[in-house]
Amino acid sequence: MSLSRSNAIDTILNRMEPDVPTSNDRIASFFGCNTFNDEAMKKYMAEDTYLSVKAIIQSGAKLDRELADKVADAMKSWAMEKGASHYAHWFQPWTGRTAEKHDSFFSLTPGGEIIEEFGGSELAQQEPDGSSFPGGGLRSTFEARGYTAWDPSSPAFILEVGDGKTLCIPTIFVTYSGQALDYKLPLLKSQSYLEEAAVSVCQYFDKAINKVTPTLGWEQEYFLVDEALFNSRPDLVMAGRTLIGRFSPKGQQLDDHYFGSIPERVYAYMRDMETECHKLGIPVRTRHNEVAPGQYELAPMFEEVNVAVDHNQLLMDIMERVAKRHKLCVLMHEKPFAGVNGSGKHNNWSMSTNTGKNLLKPGKVPGKNLQFLTFFVNTIAAVHKYADVLRASVASASNDHRLGANEAPPAIISVFIGETLTQVLDSVEAGKDFSDADVARVKDLLDKIPDLQLDNTDRNRTSPFAFTGNKFEIRMVGSTFNCAAPMTIINTIVGKQLRVFKADVDALVSKGEILDVALLKVIKKYITESKAIRFEGDNYSDEWAKEAEKRGLSNFPNTPEALDAYVSESVEALFTESGVFSKHELHAHHEVLLENYILKLQIEARTLSEMCSSGVLPAAFDYQARLVDNALGMKELGFEKSAFEPQMDIINRLANHIGSLKSLLVKMSEEVANADELGDSRSSALAFSNKVRPIMDEIRTHADDLEFFVDDRDWPFAKYRELLFIK
Ligand code: ADP
Ligand code: MG
């Protein structure tokens, strides 16, 4: 039996403060102490080993066996000195979270001698089997094994769970023939694809640039609820969101939670969680209350994209684990509560060079901002051409509740750049022949951007893809997502766009055009071509949906349709050409995402059905029976009918809701069965979206009305006011 609501509230009222150690040590004194970082490598490796490993991390080259042995040895000594007993390849399968299989360092020789073993081969590769991870048909049953292989670009770390310590090695997860089964391999490939193109374009401006790295700074939103209340809600336990629950009279309308003072218990949790993050080298920096009651946000310093992705994955794990110590539960779901804001994960993205320059930051050096303009306009052009696949990368059953729900960006992708840059682009577009004077005029204008931007703090909070001064902020990403999904897409589409740009500029130069003129001519052309994607107005308005349609922009509010983009012809061509996904991998990934959608809705429908049948209806029946007894008793005592009219009225209302609820439950289970029977995943997912979801919504309205009428003492599930306001 799940914890009853009244027991949950008793538990909270009688609970002792959890005893959680806090530390006031300076962050710098322990930051990264559980990562095999540069300092640890220097300490535990011979100098030549250290230098070779660094070179490999820089170049992305393969590690030979001899070097792998040396690295493994150093890592083992470091980890064992820190008290680790096991090691694990840590990876990011298509489940969206992380996975690890622990092996002990401890081993026995055939002679029975105890040894502690961890060599280059254990470091480099493992066969976790993992045939139960989603593969979308990439693995046939006779070759179901998956393999993990070390990704030296992300540092190994020690995961502490209770007293146990495990050396975790970030890895990619592939099939026997090397096809990706995870988020990490495509991400790494997209990164090199972008880097190569970006470096070659940078050569127009600065010969010293020989490396470009995409950067990511995420912002993570989440809710916290008391553990006891969480456990009284089968829907939170099973589906991560409330499937029923009447809106509480007070929600977020007073805006009194946003940036308000952080409740003490939550503050203790945040500090504890941040300490764990810092030990693992995750540079979290900011924390605050979000708009909805019980909602919070944290953000780190940005990092190289692959490391930032690992850190966000690790963070989600840490958040949940630390919450347990505080008798709290983290709700990472995009929409845990109807009627209050959901949670997203903004992905701030840019590119930085080996010379320390952020390619999306307009600089103050006169005449040097053509480089900024180039990367800025090419990003917009890429989003214009490939908006659909970017949309697909943030599609999921849970994010469908958020996108387009007037609290988060719509499902229509557009780009916001602000007034200053709009003027700059308009002005470049107005350039005709780019004579010497015209080029000088544009350069002069570009030089003024940093100063103009200082005065122009206007930021459109409703835009799904906004330029925020020195980076683009992708706001459609769901709070549960692996950031790698949208990051892989943005890297790839910009990588492709920069190649097209390079070819276009080179073609003009080879015809004798001066470089600056060629650059501006091509940029001008892209500004014109990609205009439809730019929108500065209110993305939440109905007018925008109409306007977007006129402009020919896509609008896919539902996941099954949004996902089609992954297997469209142009996207297949893009990914096979770039090598980021093979056609086979794309289709497998598409299949996994559809299956995931179906599974999520199946779980939700079953949970809803169970909660109604064994919780809502019995509570309604009990209360109804009491009212019937009451009315009958009054009648027997000789009261006029009008005296028990109020009871009769409620009995009637209950009967109506009970009747509707019951028949909707039958209808839902029929629709679920129909959807399950459809052969292909896309049709099945569509049936869940178009047929099952609307019935779930209808069921909810009846259940929520019953919650209003039924005696508060009888209601089995924690109510919204309790979930959102008991801290
Ligand atoms: P805001 O004013 O929106 O709070 P911040 O500058 O604090 O903006 O940044 C918000 C997020 O953007 C943080 O996670 C930060 O690390 C990240 N960020 C800042 N600069 C970059 C960059 N060049 N590349 C990627 N992310 C960045
Ligand atoms: Mg933000």
Image (cartoon, rainbow, N blue to C red):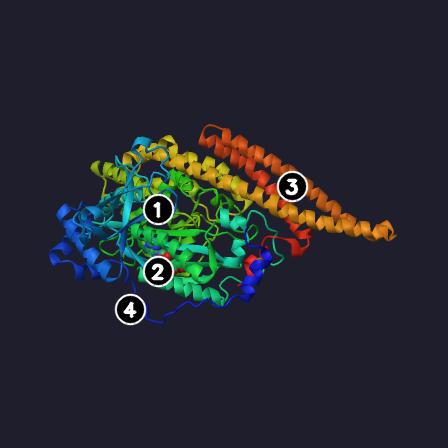
In the rendered image, which residue does mark 2 sit on? Answer: 277
In the rendered image, which residue does mark 1 sit on? Answer: 484
Q: Which mark is residue 661?
A: 3
| Measured Cα–Cα span from mark 2 to mark 1 | 19 Å
Residue at (44%, 66%) from the top-left corner? 268
Element type at marker 3? Answer: helix
**What amino acid is at disc 2?**
Cys
* Front: mark 2 or 1: 2
Whether residue 287 sits left or right of residue 722 in the image: it is: left
Look at the numbered disc 2 and say if its residue's Cβ is closer than 8 Å to ligand 1. no
Q: Residues within 10 Å of mark 2 (few under 14, many from 20)?
A: many
* Quarter residue 176 falls in: top left
**What amino acid is at disc 4?**
Ser
**What amino acid is at disc 3?**
Leu
| Measured Cα–Cα span from mark 2 to mark 3 | 46 Å
Element type at marker 4? Answer: helix
User: Quick check: which quadrant has ligand 1?
Assistant: bottom left
Lower sequence index among marks 4 and 1: 4
The residue closer to the viewer here, 531 or 338, is 338
Residue 178: give x, y in percent of width and height: 26, 37
* Quarter residue 658 falls in: top right
| Measured Cα–Cα span from mark 1 to mark 3 | 41 Å
Lower sequence index among marks 3 and 4: 4
